[in-house]
Amino acid sequence: MAEAKKTATKTVKKAAPAKTTAKKAPVVAPKLNDATYATGKRKDSVARVYLMPGKGNIIVNGKPSAEYFRRAVLQMIIAQPFGVTKRETSYDIVAMVEGGGLSGQAGAVKHGISKALEKAEPELRAALKAAGFLTRDSRVVERKHYGFRKARRSTQFSKR
């Protein structure tokens, strides 16, 4: 009886199903020798942006921008400087961004692209300035204050 019980509890390990992942083409970093460099900032994010003549490709942290910023709103934020200046397919962008969240990073990349466009073509300054893209958005999170739970949230007040 004990022998039959042992054979009944044995389980045969099945091989794990093979993962079918298509290999993506590696993103080749272009030569940054002839690139225009600028830094952009937003909240806690800092973006280092390299602008070079090209076909309109945007690479953020080694990935295409559509893959890094998956939300359509963030992709639109990054494309705004090109839309204002009518240079959608004139330049390639390589950006390294760190710190903060995705929204702040998108704002930092937009600020960096705007500053790099202005350096590359000074006549675009008026259009970029009018759209407000050259101004650093200085809004940051307010610090927590002593005696409060958060920056402005205090403990509940009880009269009696």
Image (spheres, rainbow, N blue to C red):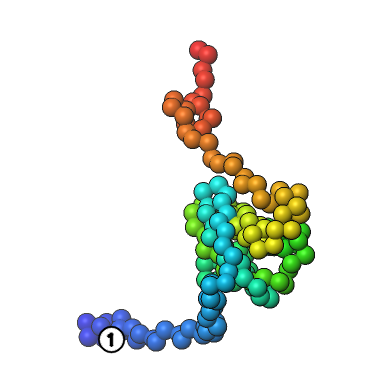
Q: Secondary structure at mark 1?
A: helix
Residue drawn 77% across the image and 65% down it = 86
Using the image, determine if residue 134 lies above or below residue 88: above
x then y, percent, for residue 50: 57, 66
- Camera sees residue 12: yes
Using the image, determine if residue 4 lies above or below residue 152: below
Q: Which residue is mark 1?
A: 7
x then y, percent, for residue 134: 66, 50
- Camera sees residue 78: no
Using the image, determine if residue 137 lies above or below residue 153: below
**Which image quadrant is residue 110 in?**
bottom right
How many discs appear?
A: 1
Using the image, determine if residue 149 lies above or below residue 12: above
Density class for disc 1 (Cα within 10 Å; few <14, some 14-19, many ≥20) is few
**Which of 127 and 66 lies nearest the eye of the viewer?**
127
x then y, percent, for residue 109: 60, 58
Residue drawn 69% across the image and 62% down it = 121
For residue 72, side relative to residue 48 (left or right): right
**Which of 147 and 3 lies nearest the eye of the viewer?**
147
Residue drawn 49% across the image and 57% down it = 98
**Which of 133 and 34 lies nearest the eye of the viewer?**
34
Q: Amino acid at mark 1?
A: Thr
